[in-house]
Amino acid sequence: MGPGNSGLLLEDARPPSLVQLSGVVVEAFDRVEHFSRARRAALRAGTAVALLAYERRVHESGQAVCLLGLRWLRVIGGVVALMLATVLAGAVSPDAAVALLIVVAGVLLPLGVAGARALPAQARLAHKTPRGRHKHVYSLASTKRGAGRELMLAVCREADADGWSLVLDAGSEKLVGYYETFGFHACGAPVKMPNGRRHVRMCRPSQDRKRAGGTGEETG
């Protein structure tokens, strides 16, 4: 990364493992949600899948991670690899193939059910998104004070340099205020999600790099 992207993981730095990054996400959200042990394990597994499937940016400390758009080629490759692994496992032992499918279903099924339940609400949020080139910020998690802010600023600078607007969903009034400090603004009224929370679709138009900036407290 160039100097204008300070806060992102440097290309010559050793990237954190998926296990480490999953731990960052789980710890950050657990501070707010206070998950049970089973919920933490499920979130860790789901986060590992998301880290593989989504484009991500990582803070140079390795203690903050931001998920952006899906990497469709990697998703398709993962599905193909899973199918091949199942076929190979079945060739060795039918029981092995069944065990593999059970493990995969245990990880992906809860994610699929939750995603299906949220589809109507997600459609209403998508309807509020202004037209034009944009990238969706799906998640920002940090376990180090200030690292999340630095990472978001770097993502904003990158988006400005590439001419992209940024879109995200804030899950609370506090987060709405936090993201406003980076230049985001609400695109409409909150939308109630299946878990009872109200999400606000927020957008940040592409800006000149010299004007990109913001302040705020750490967030999960």
Image (cartoon, rainbow, N blue to C red):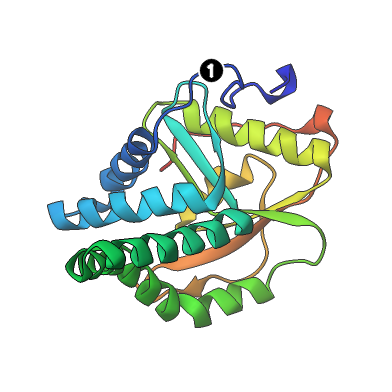
59 to the left or right of 104: right
Quarter in which the C terminus is drawn:
top left
Three-letter residue code for mark 1: Ala
In the image, 53 versus 206, the foreground residue is 53
Q: Position of residue 195 (x, y in %)?
A: 34, 72
Q: Residue at x 60, y 63 (%)?
A: 201
Q: Position of residue 152 (x, y in %)?
A: 59, 36
Q: Residue furthest bottom?
A: 120
Residue 29 in percent (x, y) is at: 33, 47
- Which residue is located at x 65 percent, y 40 percent? 182
Q: Quadrant of the N terminus?
A: top right
Task: Note whether residue 174 is visible.
Answer: no
Q: Residue at x 27, y 53 (%)?
A: 33
166 is higher (above) or lower (below) than 85: above
Q: Which residue is denoted by mark 1 in the rendering?
A: 13
Q: Is residue 58 visible?
A: yes
